[in-house]
Image: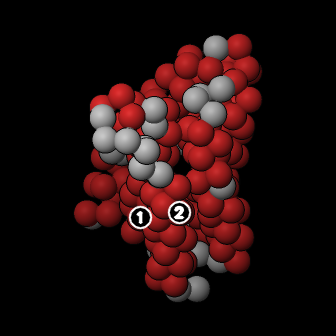
């Protein structure tokens, strides 16, 4: 199967999700900095979600560049990931519009957990299509970042119900972990 269509479709879906989020940003009613501060939680949540969608887009691109072959399982796993990523704007809006309240922050964590798990499944589906000694399999190894993401969101969700800002700090921390590019895949693509 041709991976080009898969990548183009995924790019479009992620771009639409980002566009939906920015359309949810409503300017404050007033022209002072105090008025602008009223949308602080909404803007923080937008920035965090934009970063996450951008990171998923970037990592998805690198993953597919290093992929030689895909099959129907990869297509379904990719749709599964895109499903959860399209819920990010909803989680983003609910969390931001409710001033980072406990239940919306936990719900955002659930969306991020399921996106991380779906991404892990996508990586596993892609690896099943590649030869066991492929450059991609060697580059990904045990997928420590993927496993860490799932674990971090699992921990953050109950924390969000007690101390929402601590959960947001975990979400920011996981984004920072993924912000550091995985040089192994870049080297694999370069070969």
Q: Earlier in the sequence, mark 2 or mark 1?
A: 2
Residue 137 sits above or below residue 30 on the image: below
The single residue placed furthest to the front in the displayed view is: 30
Q: Residue at x 65, y 42 (%)?
A: 94
> Could you say which quadrant of the image residue 99 lies in?
top right
- Label 1 sits on residue: 61
Packing grade of label 1 (10 A; few <14, some 14-19, many >=20) is: some
The single residue placed furthest to the left in the displayed view is: 190
Residue 29 sits above or below residue 16 on the image: above
- In the shown orientation, is residue 76 left or right of residue 60? right
Residue 132's tag is none
Residue 98 in sight: yes
Packing grade of label 2 (10 A; few <14, some 14-19, many >=20) is: some
The C terminus sits in image quarter: bottom left
> Between 115 and 68, which is closer to the camera in this rendering?
115
Name the element at disc 1: helix
Contact flag, marks 2 and 1 (Cβ < 8 Å): no
Image x and y of residue 7, in percent: 48, 75
Name the element at disc 2: helix
Q: Residue at x 70, y 77 (%)?
A: 72
Residue 35 sits above or below residue 64 on the image: above
Residue 150 in sight: no
Q: Disc 2 and disc 1: Cα gap in Å?
A: 21 Å
Image x and y of residue 120, in percent: 62, 49
Image x and y of residue 93, in percent: 59, 46
Q: Residue at x 45, y 32 (%)?
A: 38
- Label 2 sits on residue: 20
Residue 40 sits above or below residue 116 on the image: above
> Could you say which quadrant of the image residue 181 lies in?
top left
- In the shown orientation, is residue 73 left or right of residue 51? right
């Amino acid at each position: 199967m041709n991976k080009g269509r898969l990548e183009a479709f995924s790019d479009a879906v992620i771009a639409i999700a980002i566009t939906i989020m920015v359309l949810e940003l409503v300017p404050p009613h007033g022209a002072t900095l105090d008025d602008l501060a009223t949308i602080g939680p909404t803007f923080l949540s937008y920035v965090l979600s934009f970063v996450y969608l951008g990171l998923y887009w970037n990592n998805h691109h690198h993953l597919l560049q290093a992929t030689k072959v895909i099959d129907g399982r990869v297509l379904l796993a990719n749709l599964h990931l895109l499903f959860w990523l399209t819920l990010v704007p909803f989680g983003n809006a609910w969390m931001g519009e409710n001033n980072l309240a406990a239940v919306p922050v936990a719900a955002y964590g659930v969306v991020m957990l399921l996106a991380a798990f779906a991404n892990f499944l996508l990586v596993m589906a892609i690896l099943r299509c590649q030869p066991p000694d492929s450059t991609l399999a060697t580059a990904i190894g045990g997928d420590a970042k993927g496993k860490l993401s799932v674990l971090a969101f699992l921990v953050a969700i109950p924390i969000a119900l007690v101390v929402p800002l601590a959960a947001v700090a975990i979400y920011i921390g996981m984004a920072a972990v993924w912000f550091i590019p995985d040089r192994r895949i870049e080297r694999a693509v370069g070969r």
